[in-house]
């Protein structure tokens, strides 16, 4: 029984990766069925671009998860470390869902910029091991990535994002 549990724990990443791979393929198929409007000026930017890019990222990450799981299956088991990791995984997943819910609730009030910076900063803290937490670096990455995404959507794709106090002050 204990050996089966250990094998299942080792195969968890492979199983999750295969499920995620199937979901990402289904997502990409559905994303290609999104209707687009005719354009006055030829461009690659349309309503399918972001869902397609997200689907591709999910597909690549699921393949990497499968590869990581296969590599992990070849290594000998350390059951004490797996138990500790299992508890930490559950805590990280729970906190991640809580922060995602907080993001969804605060987005209409804070706007894209503030809500996204707050979400990314908190998510970095949740996912980083305690000994590798670098709060100034997390803040810089959260602000930089949010600015990059904001400019990509507003300037590159000419898409509106939820407005908040920062966007109002900046005139966006």
Image (cartoon, rainbow, N blue to C red):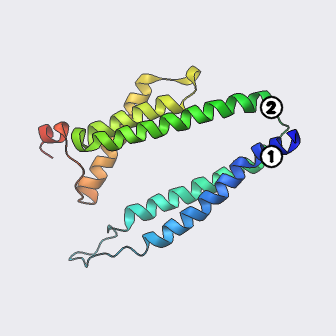
Element under disc 1: helix
> What residue appears at the point 68 percent right and 31 percent down from the top-left corner?
85
For mark 2, does the 10 Å Cα neighbourhood hold few (<14), some (14 to 19), or many (20 or more) residues? few
Upstream in the sequence, badge 1 or badge 2? 1
Q: Is residue 1 left or right of residue 40?
A: right
Cα distance between the residues tagged 1 and 2: 13 Å
Compared to residue 160, the image places residue 142 above or below, namely above
Q: Position of residue 79 (x, y in %)?
A: 80, 31
> What residue appears at the point 40 percent right and 32 percent down from the top-left corner?
121
Compared to residue 168, the image places residue 81 above or below, namely above
Q: Position of residue 63 (x, y in %)?
A: 64, 56
Q: Is residue 105 left or right of residue 166?
A: right
Q: Name which quarter of the figure residue 44 lies in.
A: bottom left
Q: Residue furthest bottom?
A: 38
Q: Which residue is mark 1?
A: 73
Q: Which residue is mark 2?
A: 79
Image quadrant containing the N terminus: top right
Element under disc 2: helix
Q: Name which quarter of the figure residue 9 lies in.
A: top right
Task: Determine if residue 20 is in view.
Answer: yes
């Amino acid at each position: 029984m204990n050996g089966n549990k250990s094998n299942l724990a080792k195969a968890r990443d492979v199983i999750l990766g295969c499920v995620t791979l199937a979901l990402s393929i289904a997502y990409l198929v559905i994303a290609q069925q999104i209707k687009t409007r005719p354009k006055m000026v030829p461009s690659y930017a349309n309503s399918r671009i972001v869902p397609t890019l997200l689907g591709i990222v999910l597909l690549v990450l699921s393949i990497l998860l499968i590869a990581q799981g296969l590599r992990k299956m070849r290594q000998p088991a350390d059951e004490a470390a797996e138990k500790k990791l299992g508890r930490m995984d559950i805590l990280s997943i729970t906190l991640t869902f809580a922060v995602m819910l907080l993001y969804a609730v605060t987005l209409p009030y804070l706007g894209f910029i503030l809500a996204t910076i707050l979400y990314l900063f908190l998510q970095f803290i949740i996912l980083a091991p305690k000994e590798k937490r670098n709060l100034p670096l997390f803040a810089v990455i959260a602000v930089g990535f949010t600015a990059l995404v904001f400019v990509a959507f507003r300037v590159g794709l000419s898409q509106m994002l939820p407005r908040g106090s920062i966007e109002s002050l900046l005139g966006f």
